[in-house]
Amino acid sequence: MKEPRILFLAQKPLGDACFEVLNKSKLGAGVKAIASNKTKDNWWRSSHLYDYCCEKNVKFIDNSVRNEDELLRVIKDFEINTLISVQHSWVLSGEILKAVDYFAFNLHNAKIPDYKGYNTYNHAILNGERDYYSTIHWIIDEVDMGEIAFEKSVAIDENTTAKSLIENANQTAIEVFENLIRTLEEGRLPMKKKIAGKGKFYSRNSLEKFREIIDVNDFDEVDRKSRAFYNPPFESAYFKLNGIKFHVEKETV
């Protein structure tokens, strides 16, 4: 296997955490460019990867807009042969993947193909799942598809909220990311486990139709929605009375 020359595409707290794992590994010196957010006007209030690039003089690509042409230029100019993505904003095209011979990996913090796209933590609770998966998969030119390299799960119980699930799943995600980095460090190819079916894709706005509690006397509905939507600073579940919203949060012990 060739010495990895890496384009790292990431954002959000999980992206920052995974970069620290990558940067501290033997592969850290192989990071030739990073694509991430440039400003702190986001809910996680961080521009950590941009700040790092400025400090270390690493090529930075602003991901605030779709940037296919710039990504392709960087791949060519820096002889990139490995793509690693963690919650990157944009789908990578077949042209970009072809430029690195499809040697590209994505950390999708959910089970594929059952939970593709967005808001997967919330939907897993709404759907009554008992396990939640973090997945590293080979990237193909289909959203959150491709063969599985690594996966690991955490349990969902009657007290799990979106907030606590994100915290637990992020720790699991870092563990599967460490598995990827360790495998590449050793010069080995990650496994390729085929997935069955097309699964389900959840869009960015897929939650809104579920946030309102319709029957406040239905314990199951109140319980699931109050847990599924508890994730400050985002809006919690609510019911309406005389046209007024009343937000609901499950008491935690």
Image: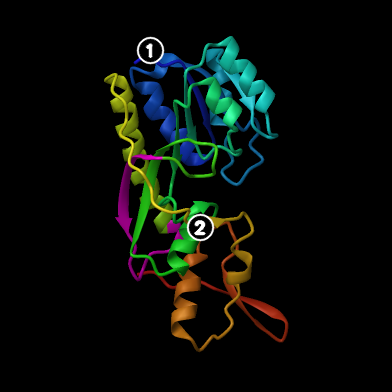
Q: CA distance from mark 2 to mark 1?
A: 36 Å
In the picture, residue 42 is in which quadrant?
top right
- Residue 34 in sight from this viewpoint: yes
**Label 2 secondary element:** loop
First reached walking from the N terminus: tag 2 or tag 1 = 1
Q: 52 and 62: which one is in front?
A: 62
Q: Is residue 228 depicted above or below 79 in this figure?
A: below
Q: Residue furthest bottom?
A: 217
- Image quadrant occupied by the N terminus: top left
Q: Circle 2 sits on which residue? A: 200
Q: Circle 1 sits on which residue? A: 3
Q: Residue furthest right?
A: 243
Magenta part of the chain = 147-163
Amino acid at pointer 1: Glu
- Left or right side of 202 for 103: left
Give coordinates of residue 73: x percent, y percent.
64, 16
- Residue 54 in sight from this viewpoint: no
Q: Residue at x 50, y 64 (%)?
A: 230
At label 2, counting other C-alpha atoms closer than 10 Å, the crowd grade (few under 14, some 14-19, many 20 or more) is: few
Q: Is residue 221 depicted above or below 156 in this figure?
A: below
Contact between marks 2 and 1 (CB within 8 A): the answer is no
Would residue 11 be counted in the magenta stretch?
Answer: no
